[in-house]
Structure formats: C-alpha cells, structure tokens
Image: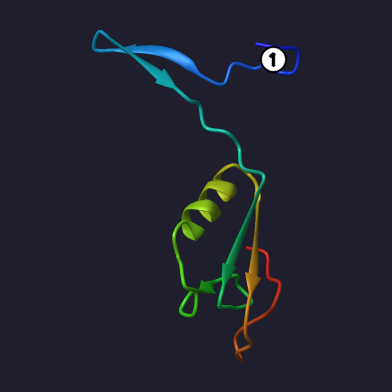
Amino acid sequence: MNEKTTADLVEIIELGGQEYLFFPAMNIDVAFIRATTADPSGNLTFEHESLLSDARLLATAAKNSGGTVIAQVIGDSEHAAAGICV
C-alpha cells in the first residue's frame, strides 16, 4: 500500500466455496483495566465499577499473548493492595 505498510494484515481464505477475509489475531503487550479491590494474589473485584465490559477479556488476551496486565485499584480494604499487576 505504501512504504510504512509492509505487513499483510488480512488474508483471503476460502471455506465451503466462499471467500472470506481472515484477520489474524494481534499480540496484546499491555492491558490496562480498572477494578475495585485486589488481594496480594492478584484477584480483582469489580463490585463498585460501573461497567465490566471487557476487563476480563482484555486481561485474558494479554496474558495469553505473553503480555502484562496492569490493574488500577480504587478504594482500600483489608485485603486490597494498590497497584498490583496481575
């Protein structure tokens, strides 16, 4: 496409006589998520978060890619440790 675009980000594959676009998964190096509390083992709770959406999916994808998950933890409880990386 141009000088900067050297890698093919999409492939055309054929399944059952039909052509489809295939987008290979990209590695996720870092995922930033927000949680309510965390314990020293890295277990997170989300009871005071307004939106859970994709926190678990992002954390799982980053971990499976060999990446790092950084959790911002709010509040303070007897089992919480601020700034724990899972």
41 is higher (above) or lower (below) than 19: below
- Name the residue located 63 percent from the left edge and 44 percent from the top edge: 66
57 is higher (above) or lower (below) than 24: below
Instruction: Give the position of the N terminus as an image quadrant.
Output: top right
Instruction: Give the position of the C terminus as an image quadrant.
Output: bottom right
Q: Quadrant of residue 4?
A: top right
Q: Identify the residue at the far left of this view.
A: 16
Q: Identify the residue at the far bottom of this view.
A: 78
- 77 relative to 6 in the view: left or right: left
Q: Identify the residue at the far right of this view.
A: 3
Secondary structure under badge 1? loop
- 4 relative to 40 in the view: left or right: right
Which color scheme does this rendered protein use?
Answer: rainbow
Instruction: Please count the marks in the image.
Output: 1
Answer few, some or many: residues within 10 Å of disc 1's Cα (few below 14, many 20 plus, some between 14 and 19): few
Residue 73 is situated, as x and y percent measured from the top left of the image, at 63, 75
- Name the residue located 56 percent from the left edge and 21 percent from the top edge: 9
- 42 relative to 13 in the view: left or right: right
Q: Quadrant of residue 84?
A: bottom right
- Name the residue located 65 percent from the left edge and 17 percent from the top edge: 7
57 is higher (above) or lower (below) than 77: above
Q: Identify the residue at the far front of this view.
A: 2
Residue 44 is situated, as x and y percent measured from the top left of the image, at 54, 72
24 is higher (above) or lower (below) than 15: below
Residue 33 is situated, as x and y percent measured from the top left of the image, at 59, 62
Disc 1 residue type (three-letter) = Thr
Name the residue beneath numbered marker 1.
Answer: 6
- Name the residue located 47 percent from the left edge and 53 percent from the top edge: 57
